[in-house]
């Protein structure tokens, strides 16, 4: 018996909501195939699409390590499984690559065993996987990858994750410029203290964005997608960041900013054609500057 599971890439932070907001994309995503083995233990037997970058050792790979944690949690260390991981998206891209793999693995093992625990109960295990990948158990990629849609982490302790509604005509253009920005490094460079006046502006924006989603107010969504805390520091790691913003905003995007810890960037639009046009214009600009990129367009 085997199961095959796909988990989607995600955009975390959504500009103003560092570590608390995130949403799932239609594509790309990762796939896991998992089957039971006679012998107890978790084994990685195949990894494709990672250019040899991911570890195969069961305790080091976030997928197998998370599956081991899962088996421990449900008290079934007697079970054996083998895992194949197919990465369909770049590592270190800011699109929740480790989260998608981890979520696919956890969902797969839970399916394989007849769902002894709920989808929500998989979340803390997926967060542990993120801790292994980048040093901190942030949930803003794993929550939307696991639950779908747009999610808000209202609190980490205790964990309180809320599903948010999304207006019908919201689309997203994602551009991944081919430079490497490891999440761990991109987290370490952020200032740990913020000014109260900046915090006020930031939480005004978060509240504005969430209200905009509920009220289907595209203009409010657009006004609220501003990050005064993190972006000024992280933008330095992303080539042509401010030029890309100019291109997106003058083409009619609602917003433009960093996806997760970067280097991917994304724009919201109110129709698919405009999202495609923005992807096209930005990729042309990057190519002219000698930078390769991948682009994705998604509904939200
Ligand atoms: N909230 C996380 C960060 C997302 O910005 O570091 C990482 O993809």
Image (cartoon, helix red, strand yellow):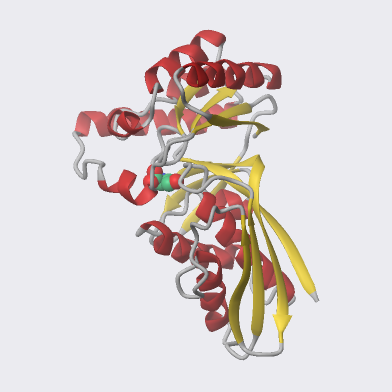
Q: Is residue 270 visible?
A: no
Q: Report the residue at 67% width, 72% height from top.
A: 110
Q: Position of residue 236 (x, y in %)?
A: 30, 29
Residue 19 vs 228, above or below: the answer is: below
Quarter of the figure that contains the N terminus: bottom right
Q: Position of residue 55 (x, y in %)?
A: 48, 66
Q: Report the residue at 40% width, 28% height from top.
A: 205
The image quadrant of residue 101 is bottom right
Q: Report the residue at 68% width, 19% height from top.
A: 271
Q: As drawn, which residue projects farthest toward the top?
A: 250
The image quadrant of residue 204 is top left
Q: Report the residue at 58% width, 54% height from top.
A: 100
Give the total number of marks visible in the rendering: 0
Between 162 and 7, the one nearer to me in the picture: 7
Q: Is residue 152 visible?
A: yes
Quarter of the figure that contains the C terminus: top right
Residue 37 vs 64, above or below: the answer is: below
Between 291 and 115, the one nearer to me in the picture: 291
The image quadrant of residue 168 is top right
Between 108 and 35, the one nearer to me in the picture: 35
Q: Position of residue 223 (x, y in %)?
A: 45, 19
Q: Position of residue 283 (x, y in %)?
A: 55, 21
């Amino acid at each position: 018996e085997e199961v095959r599971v796909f988990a989607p890439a995600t955009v975390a932070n959504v500009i103003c909501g560092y570590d608390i907001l995130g949403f799932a994309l239609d594509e790309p995503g990762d796939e896991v195939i998992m089957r039971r083995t006679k012998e107890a233990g978790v084994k990685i037997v195949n990894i494709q699409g990672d250019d040899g970058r991911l570890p195969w050792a069961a305790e080091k790979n976030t997928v197998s390590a998370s599956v081991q944690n899962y088996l421990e949690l449900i008290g079934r260390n007697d079970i054996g499984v083998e895992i194949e991981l197919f990465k369909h998206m770049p590592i270190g891209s800011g699109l929740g690559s480790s989260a998608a793999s981890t979520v696919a693995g956890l969902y797969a093992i839970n399916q394989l065993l007849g769902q002894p625990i709920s989808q929500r109960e998989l979340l803390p295990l997926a967060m542990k996987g993120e801790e292994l990948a980048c040093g901190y158990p942030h949930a803003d990629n794993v929550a939307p990858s696991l639950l779908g849609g747009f999610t808000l982490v209202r609190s980490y302790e205790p964990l309180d994750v809320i599903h948010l509604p999304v207006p019908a005509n919201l689309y997203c253009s994602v551009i991944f410029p081919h430079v490497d920005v490891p999440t761990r490094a991109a987290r370490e460079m952020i200032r740990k203290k913020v000014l109260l006046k900046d915090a006020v502006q930031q939480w005004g924006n978060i509240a504005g964005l969430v209200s905009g989603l509920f009220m289907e107010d595209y203009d409010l969504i657009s006004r609220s997608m501003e990050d005064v805390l993190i972006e000024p520091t992280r933008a330095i790691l992303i080539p042509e960041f401010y030029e890309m913003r100019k291109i997106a905003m003058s083409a009619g995007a609602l917003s433009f900013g960093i996806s997760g810890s970067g280097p991917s960037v994304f724009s919201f639009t109110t129709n698919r054609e405009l999202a495609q046009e923005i992807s096209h214009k930005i990729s042309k600009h990057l190519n002219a500057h000698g930078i390769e990129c991948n682009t994705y367009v998604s509904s939200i």
